[in-house]
Amino acid sequence: MATIEEMKKVASQVRRDIIRMVCMAKSGHPGGSLSSTDILTTLYFGVMKQDPATWTREGKGQDMFILSAGHLAPVYYAVLARAGYYPASELATLRQYGSRIQGHPSVEHDLPGVSQCSGSLGQGLSVAAGLALGKKMSGEDSYAYVLCGDGETEEGQFWEAAMFAAHHNLDNLIAMTDWNGQQIDGPVDEVSGQGDLEAKWKAFGWNTIVADGHDIEAILNAYNEAKKINKSNGKPCMILFRTEMGHGVDFMAGTHKWHGKAPSEEQCAEAMKQLEETLGDF
């Protein structure tokens, strides 16, 4: 497992990767990818028991991850590449015809690290709950993780999965919400109005943790606490990570306008000045 300082360096490089990928493709979703970078970096480099050398889509005997908010594919691909699942140079092919790294995660080309295609929002928690139940039935001592968007939780299927997971005491299921308060049409509270998400998850029978989604140490502590309380009371856990859309790039931060907009070459160059290159650009 990497140290906190090492994970900070990986996160900085991943943010550079995201901006460059989306700029080169002239299409993609940088805002939420930037806000969830620290969450996924910490998961892959400091928490999850998964090995690129032995990874299989079935995930038997290893922890598994599902990206429910499929439009956050840029951060997913960058983290996987930096974790050694495939060469970072492949990131340059984002959204190209025939590429393994499409606009949303796909299993068509057997991209290492990707267990499930995702794109239609609201479905990932159902998949992760099924994986967690299967692992419990098989007697495995491993976890299913899933990353969701806060706007995504407006989907009804999301709460059906929440009830299912609590009913089946899936204490090996840890879900995370990238709680940046923004979605494609504007602030989440203005589009739908979610109310008190923390209270809702508790009401659905889940352990619930709220943490700073840009503090690596706080993120790591939240994951460890989730495992601890899950096993103590036999419930699944939702970690609500408070984040900022577009975090790390000042002109992208805090606005929904960069949900699905690619930066220009000039904007890409400006973003690169704000992000430290730590592992070498692809």
Image (cartoon, rainbow, N blue to C red):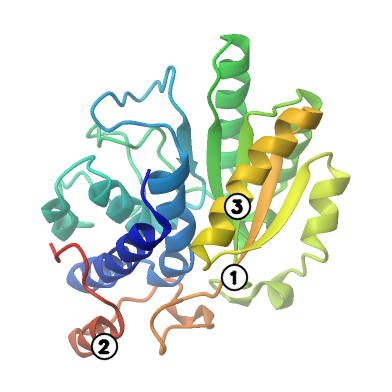
**Residue 65: image x %, image y %?**
46, 38
- Decide if residue 173 is on the left or right side of residue 275: right
Q: Which residue lies at the image location 23% right of the left edge and 39% below the top edge?
A: 85
- First reached walking from the N terminus: tag 2 or tag 3: 3
- Decide if residue 140 is on the left or right side of residue 260: right
Q: How far, Cα to Cα, is label 2 from label 3?
A: 35 Å
Badge 2 local density, few (<14 within 10 Å), some, or many (20+)? some
**Residue 201: image x %, image y %?**
79, 49
- Decide if residue 92 is on the left or right side of residue 158: left
Q: Which residue lies at the image location 29% right of the left edge and 84% below the top edge?
A: 271
Give the amino acid at mark 3: Asn
Look at mark 1 in the image and give the residue it sits on. 180
Q: Is residue 96 visible to the viewer in this orientation of the structure?
A: no
- First reached walking from the N terminus: tag 3 or tag 1: 1
Look at mark 2 in the image and give the residue it sits on. 267
Give the amino acid at mark 2: Gln
Look at mark 3 in the image and give the residue it sits on. 221
Q: Return the residue nearer the eye: 235 or 223.
A: 223
Q: Return the residue nearer the eye: 276 or 235.
A: 276
Q: How far, Cα to Cα, is label 3 from label 1?
A: 20 Å
Depicted 22 relative to depicted 139: above or below = below
Q: Which residue lies at the image location 67% right of the left edge and 72% below the top edge?
A: 188
